[in-house]
Each structure stands twice: as C-alpha cells, then as structure tokens.
Image (cartoon, grey):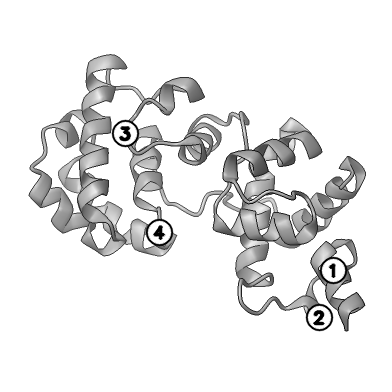
Amino acid sequence: MQTEKACRIYSVLKKIYISKDTNLCFLEFENPFQILVMTVLSAQTTDKTVNIVKKELFKRYPDCKSLAEADIIDVERIIKSTGFYHSKAKNIIAASKLLCSDFKGTVPDKIEELVKLPGVGRKTANIVLNHAYGLNEGIAVDTHVKRVAFRLGMTENTDPDKIEKDLTALLPKKVWGEINFLLISHGRAVCDARKPACDICEIKDLCRYYEEKNTAD
C-alpha cells in the first residue's frame, strides 16, 4: 500500500470515530503509573473489566511504592477477573519495585527504559508514551490493529513488531497515536474478526479484503 492510500483511510476513519470531545484512550486513568499498570492488566481481557478493577486496586495501592510492598495474594484477588492474574500480579509488583529502585518512582518517558519493566513490551510502552506523555514513538499493535491493518492491505505481516514498522513507514508520525485508536474502533464497530460488516464499511473501496472477496464471488 502507498502512503497516499493509507492517509485516505486514516482521514475517513478519523471523520467517523473522532470528534473534538473524543477520548482516545479506552482505559480510564489519572496518571502515568495508572495507565502503565492498567495496560499490563488489559492483556487478554476487556478495557471495561480493567476499568472496574482499577477502582479497588488504586484505592489500596495508589502509587508504585505501595504496590511494590503489596501482598501478591491480595493483588491477585483484586485483579483476578482480568485473567492470567498470577503472572499479571507478579509483573505489576515487580515493575513497581523497579520504578522505585531505578526510576525514582516515576514512569519513564523513553521506550527503551519502559521495556525494561516486567510485563512491558513495545505495545504497552507505546500506549503509555502516547497517553501519559503525548509522545508518538510507535504504534501499539493489538489484535484489532493486526486484523484490520492486514485486511486493508497496510501490512503483509502477522508479527506485531513487523506490523508496527509497516504502519509507521506508511503514516506520518503525528497520526501514529490516532491510527491505533481508529483501527481498534473500526475493528470493534465494523471489521469484526468472524463476520466483518463489509456492506456498511465506509472504507470498503480502499480495502484489499473487500476487493478480494468480491473478486472471488
């Protein structure tokens, strides 16, 4: 795909999903520490579940110092509904300890430092940088971004890191944060994994999947 086509897709999706009042983060956080922990918890679960869990979690453990000293059994109890709660509890406690020991209790604003934290990969780091600090250092690739980008023809890859490289090469840096939100929104609203609603899709004429589907028919 050429940059011009990718930018047309971005423009159409932006008109559909973003207004001046749109919150571009699906997680309801108050500070960088919260978005870091919540993004780690969001793996393999819904944002709604994490938004519910965070109320008790941050009431009991409002900062990295308190979470670093937390009883893992108690943390597991609080986050159990997010799934994989043994490893998630271990990671967020370990990450909190490292924040306290190596980063003076502050969530770093550099991707190479963020990925040193337990449970934090490029996807989580990109989300934290964008939403906590307004920095576009990459594009977070989740299951929706992966699916929609591939169907559209924005990538030929299935590996998230390679998909990120393809998308960042296609689109100007200033829209990297927005394209993540747009592809997720479109994946949830229209481009369903099992049954994409191609007939009502406003970017179907720019979509490789739709073109190939019609050709096959």
Q: Is residue 110 visible?
A: no
Using the image, tell me which numbered label, if any, was put on residue 199: 2
Q: Earlier in the sequence, mark 4 or mark 2?
A: 4
The mark nearer the N terminus, 2 or 3, is 3
Q: Sort mark 3 into few (<14), some (14-19) or many (20+) by Cα contacts within 10 Å.
A: some
Give above or below for 45 relative to 39.
Answer: below
SS at mark 3 in the image: loop
In this view, the mark in front (4 or 2) = 4
Mark 2–mark 3 distance (CA, rounded to whole Å): 43 Å
Which quarter of the rendering shows the C terminus? bottom right
Determine which residue is flagged by label 1: 204
Q: Which mark is residue 44?
A: 4
> Disc 2 residue type?
Asp
Mark 3, residue position: 118
In this rendering, the answer to whether 187 lies above or below 20 is below
Q: CA distance from mark 2 to mark 1?
A: 8 Å
Q: Is residue 214 left or right of residue 136?
A: right
Residue type pointed to by label 4: Gln
Residue 135 x/y as whole percent: 59, 29
- Between residues 33 and 93, which one lies in front from this camera angle? 93
How packed is label 4: few (under 14 Cα within 10 Å), some, or many (20 or more)?
A: few
CB of mark 2 within 8 Å of CB of mark 1?
yes
Give me the C-alpha separation between circle 4 and circle 1: 28 Å
Q: Residue at x 66, y 44 (%)?
A: 163
Q: Secondary structure at mark 4?
A: loop
